[in-house]
Image (cartoon, grey):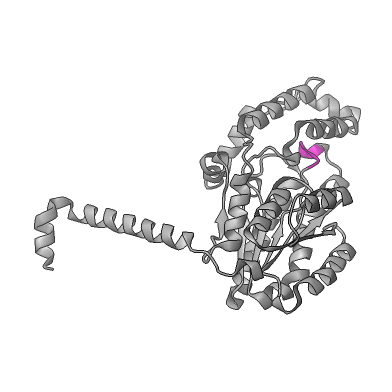
Amino acid sequence: MDMQFVYDLLGENAWSYIGATLVVLWFIVWLYRDSLEIEELTDKYVFVTGCDSGFGNLLCKKLDRRGFHVLAGCLTEKGADDLTRATGPYLKTVLLDVASQDSIEKAMEWTKKEVGDKGLWGIVNNAGRSLPMGPTEWMRVEDFQSTLNVNMNGTIAMTMTFLPLIKKARGRIVNIASVLGRVAANGGGYCISKFAVESFSDCLRRDINYFGINVCIIEPGFFKTAVTSLDPLERELHRLWNQLTPEVQASYGDKYLDKYIKVQRFIMNAVCDTDLSKVTGCMEHALTAAYPRTRYSPGWDAKLLWIPLSYMPSCVVDIGLRLVLPRPSKSV
C-alpha cells in the first residue's frame, strides 16, 4: 500500500493513529499471551510455605481444586490438620519452620520421596512475619533478627535447598515480597526483609533463566490477614515502648505512643483489602501461566499508591510520612 495514500486517508495525524493502533494491537497480543496456561496440571507438584492461615492456606485450597499435587508446609500441627480436613487426597502437609535449616532439610527429604523423578514444578515462599513494627529507635537487634530469620533467611534457605528439584522440572519460584519492599514506610525488620526478597529474586531470576526456570515476585498491598491484625501490632508497640529507657521515652513524649497507634489504626482500616483472592490469584497465575509475569502487584493501594511512590524522589515519601506520623515532643 502506498504510504502517501495512508497519509491522505488519515490526514496530518497519521502517525498518531498508527501509533495508537500499534499500542492497541500490542495490548491485545499481551492479553492473549497472558491468558495462556500450561498443560497437565495434575502431574505437577507445588510446595507452599506458611499454610496455617492467610494467603498460603487459601492458595493450597485453590491449587488442590485445580488438580495439583500440593505439598503444604505448616508451622503447627493444628494448621496442618485443619488444612488436611478441608482439602482432597492430593494435598499433603509437613511441619516446617523456615527459620530452621534442620526443619528445611527434613522437608526437602520428605519432598524428594513425594515427587520422585518428576521434580518440583513450583515453590511458593509465602511464610512470613511482620512483627515487631514501629519506630526504628525502639528496636533491639533481636527484634530485627526475628523477622529477618523468617522473611529473608527463610526465603533464601528454602529456595537454595529446593532449587535442584525445581531445576529438574524446569519449574517456577514464586517469592512473596510486599509493597513495603518498594517503599520503606516503617521501622523494624519487615521492610528490610522484603527489600531483600526483591533483590534476591531479581538476582536469582537473571542467573537461572538459562535453565528454563521462572522467578516471580508477588508484591501485595495491604490485606486483612494475621500479619495486619491490629491487636498484635498494638501489643508489640506497647512492648517496644516499655523496653525504652526513660530518656528515650521523654524524647518522644507521653502522648506519642497513643498518637502513633491512632495513625496506624486509621491506615489499616482505610487501606486493608478483605479480598485475599486478589493475591492468591496472582500466585496461581505465576504457577499456571505459560508466560508468567516477573512481578505482580495485587491490591488497589499497590497499583495506585505504593508502586507509583516507589518511582518518585525519596523526598516525596519522606514528606508524606512526616505529614502522617506524629512528631516527637523534643524534635528539632
Residue 313 in picture, x, y percent from top left: 54, 44
Q: Residue furthest front?
A: 89
Q: Nearer the viewer, residue 215 or 37?
A: 37
- Residue 7 visible to an observer of this rendering: yes
Residue at (84% x, 64% y) in the render: 104
Residue 255 in picture, x, y percent from top left: 78, 20
Please tell me whether residue 103 is drawn above or below residue 282 in the rendered image: below
Residue at (37% x, 57% y) in the render: 28
Residue at (76% x, 44% y) in the render: 130
Split into 4 quadrants, where in the image is the C terminus?
Answer: top right
Please tell me whether residue 305 is drawn above or below residue 151 in the rendered image: above
Q: Nearer the viewer, residue 174 or 55?
A: 55
Q: Quadrant of residue 114?
A: bottom right
Q: Residue furthest top?
A: 255
Q: Quadrant of residue 199?
A: bottom right
Relative to 93, is 196 on the left or the right? left
Relative to 146, is 194 on the left or the right? left
Q: Which region shows up in magenta?
A: 131-137
**Is 275 part of what is drawn in magenta?**
no
Residue 136 in picture, x, y percent from top left: 77, 40
Residue 2 in picture, x, y percent from top left: 11, 67
- Residue 219 visible to an observer of this rendering: no
Relative to 33, is 18 on the left or the right? left
Split into 4 quadrants, where in the image is the N terminus?
Answer: bottom left
Count of marks placed on residues = 0
Q: Nearer the viewer, residue 58 or 266?
A: 58
